[in-house]
Amino acid sequence: MKTKFGIAKVMLMISSMLLLLVIVACSESEESSSSDSNSNGDVAKLTVWLWPGMGIEEQIEQYDEEHENVEVEIQLAEFADVHSNLTTSLAAGSGAPDISAVEVKGINKYIGNPQHFVNLFDLGAEEVADDYLDWKFKQAQTIDGEYLLGLPTDIGPQAMAYRTDVFEEAGLPTDREEVAELIQTWEDYIEVGKTIKEKTGKALIDDAGGLYTVVEGQGEKKYYDAEGNIIIESNEQIDYAYNLATEVIESGLESGFEQWSTEWGTGMTNGDFATLLAPAWMMGFMQENAPDASGKWDIAKLPGETSGNWGGSFLTIPEQSDHPEEAYELIKWLLSPEQQLVTFERNGNFPSTPEIYETDAIQNFKSEYFSGAPVGQIYAEAAKDVSEVLEGPDSITIEEVLKDAIIRVRDGQGSPEESWQQSIDELERTLGR
């Protein structure tokens, strides 16, 4: 009996110890699980790819702070790098972010393969469609209208920034209404540039490549027709834009500063060039690159019959995202009319949400940097002229190659005609058509 009792007692003790170990282990597991849950369990970690100048970083950080269920990391890269890195990641099937900006020229490249992106219609985007310009919203849709790749950020209505001190030195009017009256056409613009050069020795414009982009954006078409055919050589607006850009170079009216360079910002500060052609988002770049030039610039209506459009982007959710719902909630909030107004007031990016164009917040918005100009009113008026222009799948490549032609002329590496033909030959090889 004694032996049996001893064995039973030992077995009971062992069983109790095992039970205790299980309880402790479960408790530690629960504590660990609870700890993980607090730091990671219900938190969606979102990576966002942007390029400099988009002006939405501060609002993203605000959203991050106000929403405990998300943790947002912003990764900035140069414009071209964002697009090339995204293309590489999509092709590889890994490495894409949860949210990526895609510029208007790039969105057409991806529309042919929409499966690489989350269809925002599946997440409820139809409910916010009326918030945006109809043509802008449709730019991110597939042809059949069944798939939406992104929500619109801004659009790029255009105006002309000018140095009042340089205009005054040249004996020209400085009042923005009088300047707009003086420079109604691009031919007027070049004549004014010749006067400025003669009277002050200063350049008319920072970069002829920027002139090319602005003028091409005033046309009804760019590089493609509605059937997807490349129409570079038959599009009169492209020819006109290129000839204007090369005329400015050959007349000595260009500063020679490449846009976005350090020298560009210095020249902007010093008044080395008299005008800068400025889509709305350019205001932010100017203030960032030449803060000491505040009050020396003003803004007037752009030469030409229409404003045209330069730029404007979308926020997309690559299919690789592990948190598409949370990503969508972020971009829906960030690109709402209310938040697009905040972006405009802070950075100058003009909203793609027309319901706020006639509000006092837009109409009465003035910029001290631009001599108190009513920039809200100026760009809202320009926005009325903006309409859809088909970009096509290889617009980014085409524009880079054609602007290389302008750079060669600037660098004395060929006549305008020779350099143009060199770019056309390169495009035929690159695009295989």
Image (cartoon, rainbow, N blue to C red):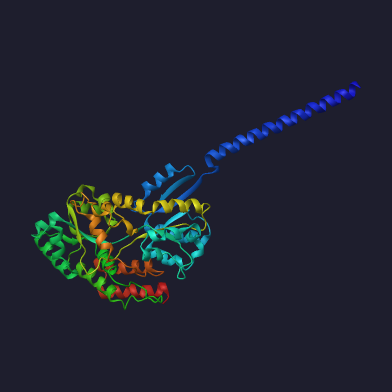
Compared with 112, 296 (above or below) is above
Which of the pair 198/419 is nearer the observer? 198
Residue 93 in the image: state x and y as whole percent.
53, 59
Give the residue furthest to the right: 1
In the picture, measured across the screen, residue 312 lies left or right of residue 192, that is right
Give the residue furthest to the left: 171
* Residue 257 visible in rendering: no
Quarter of the image for residue 316 reads: bottom left
Residue 309 in the image: state x and y as whole percent.
30, 64
Residue 97 in the image: state x and y as whole percent.
47, 54
Which of the pair 3/366 is nearer the observer? 366
How many numbered badges does the structure rendering display?
0
Give the residue furthest to the bottom: 234
In the picture, measured across the screen, residue 299 lies left or right of residue 144, that is left
Q: Quadrant of the N terminus?
A: top right
Quarter of the image for residue 4 reads: top right
In the picture, measured across the screen, residue 326 lies left or right of residue 139, that is right
* Residue 347 visible in rendering: yes
Question: For the point 39% across and 77% down, which residue is it?
Answer: 229
Question: For the point 20% across and 70% down, which residue is it?
Answer: 247
Compared with 354, 394 (above or below) is below
Q: Quadrant of the C terminus?
A: bottom left
Residue 262 in the image: state x and y as whole percent.
27, 52
Quarter of the image for residue 301 reads: bottom left
Give the residue furthest to the top: 2
Compared with 211, 169 (above or below) is above
